[in-house]
Image (cartoon, coloured by chain):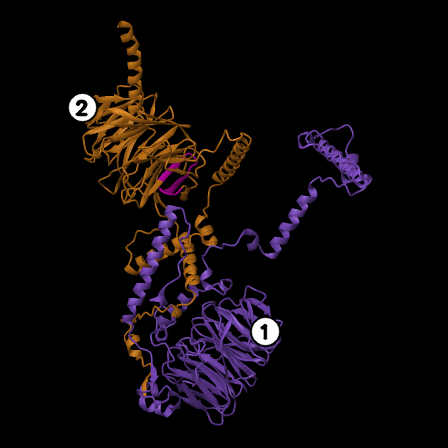
Chain colours: A purple, B orange
Amino acid sequence: MEKYERRTGKLGKTKDKKLRSFLKRGDLKSKDAAEKAADAEILLTESNGYLEPENEMEQTYKVKQEDIVANVDLATANKKISLDLPNFGPYSIDYSLTGNYLLLGGRKGHVSSFNWKLGEMGCELQLQETVHDVKYLQNDYECFAVAQKKYVYLYDQFGAEIHQLKHHVGATHLEYLPYHYLLATAGTTGYIKYQDVSTGQLVAELRTKLGNTTALRQNPYNAVLNAGHSNGQVSLWAPNMSTPLVKLLSSRGPVRSISVDRSGNYMAVAGQDKSLKIWDIRRFAVLEEYYSPKPASSTSISASGLLSVGWGSHVQIWKDVLTRSGEKVSAPYMNHLLPGHQVETVRFCPFEDILGIGSTKGFDSMIVPGSGEANVDALEINPYSYATRTGRRETQVKMLLEKLQPDTITLNPNDIGKVDSRSHAERLSASQKQAEEEHQALLDKQKLNALPGTKPANSRLRKMLRKKTKNVVDQRKMRIEHAWEREKQARENIKRKAEGLEVKTTGAAMRRFM
Amino acid sequence: MKFKTISRSADDYVPVANTQSARQPRNLDPDMHPFERAREYTRALNATKLDRMFAAPFLGQLGAGHVDGVYSLAKNPLKLGVLASGSGDGVVKTWDLGSHEEQWSVNAHDGIVRGLCYTPKSQLLSCSSDGTVKLWSPSTMSPLQTYHSLSGGGLMSIDHHYSEDQFITAGTQLEVWDTNRSKPKSTLSWGADNLSSVRFNHTETNICASTGNDRSIVVYDLRTNSPVQKLVTTLNNNALAWNPMEAFVFAAASEDHNAYLYDMRNMKRALNVFQDHVAAVLDLDFSPTGQELVTGSYDRTIRIFRANEGHSRDIYHTKRMQRVFSVRFTMDSRYIASGSDDGNVRMWRSVANDRSGIKSAKQRTKIEYDRALTERYKHMPEIRRINAARRVPKAVKVARNIKREELEAMKRRHLNYVKNSKGRAGFTPEREKHIVGVGIADKVAKQTQKQRRKEKKPQQETSE
């Protein structure tokens, strides 16, 4: 029930009766919706996986993949695949949003996209150029980006090069924000660049000023990019801010890998100093600190909150490390060894209990019971909507219609549509503030103030009187004459005060005749 | 060790045949639906844009219209598809709204046909500036009956009782007629030399109200055969209309560019002020739901107001439409008819982007969803801007700017006046500004009685 509740505003001192009843009705509706959503859980057709010991002697981390394969149904067992690709590794990998397609990018130029469930090849490329990272873009598998030696290139599903992104130089990390249609790149230049893949425009170029970007991962909850740098800092970026939203110091060496869970609450950061820190990114506080025997090369968090860490030739899966605070988890959930490999990338497959591992010698997948989300939503990213042609088209159109603007990316995505309760002065941007100050200064200058400090001959008022035609007496001249009289008196008073004499003042009642 | 892994079968989700529709499983976990608000906002923005894109309020004119200006319209409360119109040359026509064709036309009067109304028997009553009322069966070419007003002058307005055989006319005084008699049953008046409009209340059926040229609105009770209340405003009122759902509430069209909503129990204060027109409001009509109000104005535009909002929700105009002298909602509240000086009777959609075709359940759900979303995000600047944007005739635009400037100047002047009055002067609410005074018949009667008693008493004393 709590999971489904949307936080509603406080009624507080709302005096307006109409508004009050309107807000109350809204609250009731939202409460009702939460209750109904909780009740609808009974309609979920699938259940999540699990791996549980039957007695105290059994340990889940001792379970071997062979044991699992032997015990699960044939369809699941077939999902464990292993590709021996010793020549072009190490491989960076990416699953498409639906989890149906797999993209492999070998460092030495081998790129391959295929439907791993059906075993259908999409395309295979030999680029004969360094490949740093690969990423699926819009429409599931129909377009993907490859960060190559110098530029980032876009390819279609058949492997034809559609674009060369010349602005994205030296990119080593790619991220795709599916709801915003933004491709984000970062790499050796220290810039984070956003490219809108639906319109082709370069949306933002952000200079990190922190050198090499060593890790990049989006927060799926708010589309903020979390970038790791070689000085151990993690900075959070949104395309409408030229400075980082937040900067955190996480490790004592370069950051190796970042991963964020789908609720946007937790972040795992692995560093060169072998540390693995779990951050609460609502409070920006470290929840727990773990260490790996070797610096972790890649981390990934699954839909159910399992954390996978790849280091050396090992892959470890940790359970409950995100939510449990104050008490360290002593043993991993699962262990996996790839003898003779060096793990490059680990990625959980969406909607499946599968972890994909890209390594120096190819690709391996691992069955991790209880890692994926079993129940799909037909109106969201849906693995089955791409099965038919009409489904593909409809999804494409719907997603495009609901494309979010880049400036809606904020730390709290629920701020949209809310009242900005800051005062006018607080809300003003720096340039507006400056303009306002200048305007005020100009107004002040225009006032005819008596300036007793200046010499009588240099007085602005005197100059004005001198300039004015002698025989014309108008309002302005009278005003200046009054001010000039006042100034003279003020000057006189300063003199008298210095001599220790009594200061002449006219009372408030008489001043109007001066 | 106990294992379980996800094992969905694609056969459960993917339709086997083209004719089958795909299963639509839902998972309402909020984590599965990121950017909920941003996406809702985007949908609301799209819906608002589509609303404006599909806005096509003008349906067309009825037949070839009239030769002279159309100064009166009447809808039949019992039939949807007919409308009657009366013109300046004395011609009365009825129209078939389905085909936009003329049904019946008759040279009814010698003067301008100022008032038209349907009787519960679907007969038509017309009144004219020639001082006669004629009863028509809208198929024959001669009147069933002709009534001659006793007051001598022209008749300006007519309305029939909800159920009984009586009707009222407005001329130099209010005349109450029995349909079966040739002379009025009674006449009523309170101050005004000329009445411009009368309307029966169709809920409290014996109550009626009139607007007069002494800037007054008078409410009458026909059971006691007397006026009950009188309201005097700063400028003349041109027309009034009762709310068909709230028996006490009526709206009046004023010369001061506004329409006002009143509660007849307390007329010291208007319930609402409908602003936006830049010239006198000439006619107005409530929608049958009582939720909306349509006004026709001398500025050649029609505006639609929600009864609980002060500014119009839409403005309709065409290049050729002249001063709008009469407007009516149809009985299904989906269309609006307008009669203007140029002799045409025009039909409009009451919701500009509404389409009358049959909608599938999916379409209806979508429309409802979009409406809820636009309502929810209507305060967002972008949505508000798109929603409010209307192309307005240049003359109206210019007049609006001038009016705004004038009002601001008046406001400023009054502010200065209040500032320097040392508390003697204050501000009057917008809803009371136009009200000069309210008279209640009982009070007046009591006062006169008191006065009489006072006058009598001293006489008695002296006699004793």
Q: Is residue A137 visible?
A: no
Q: Callout 1 environment at 10 Å: few (<14), some (14 to 19), or many (20+)?
A: few
Magenta-drawn stretch contains B9 = no
Above or below residue B230? Residue B94 is below
Q: Is A329 positioned to the left or the right of B174 in the image?
A: right
Name the residue tied to disc 2.
B181
Quarter of the N terminus of chain B within the rendering:
bottom left
Q: Is B37 positioned to the left or the right of A447 in the image?
A: left
Q: Residue at x 29, y 6 (%)?
A: B462
- Judging from the image, what secondary structure is the residue with disc 1 in? loop
Chain letter of the residue beneath label 2 in the structure image: B
**CA distance for labels 2 and 1:** 93 Å
Q: Quadrant of residue B210?
A: top left
Name the residue tied to disc 1.
A166
Q: Is residue A375 visible?
A: yes
Residue A243 horizontal/vertical position (percent) = 59, 66
Chain letter of the residue beneath label 1 in the structure image: A
Q: Nearer the viewer, residue A266 or A380?
A: A266
Q: Which residues are magenta?
A: B294-309
Question: Could you tell me the amino acid type at mark 1?
Answer: Lys
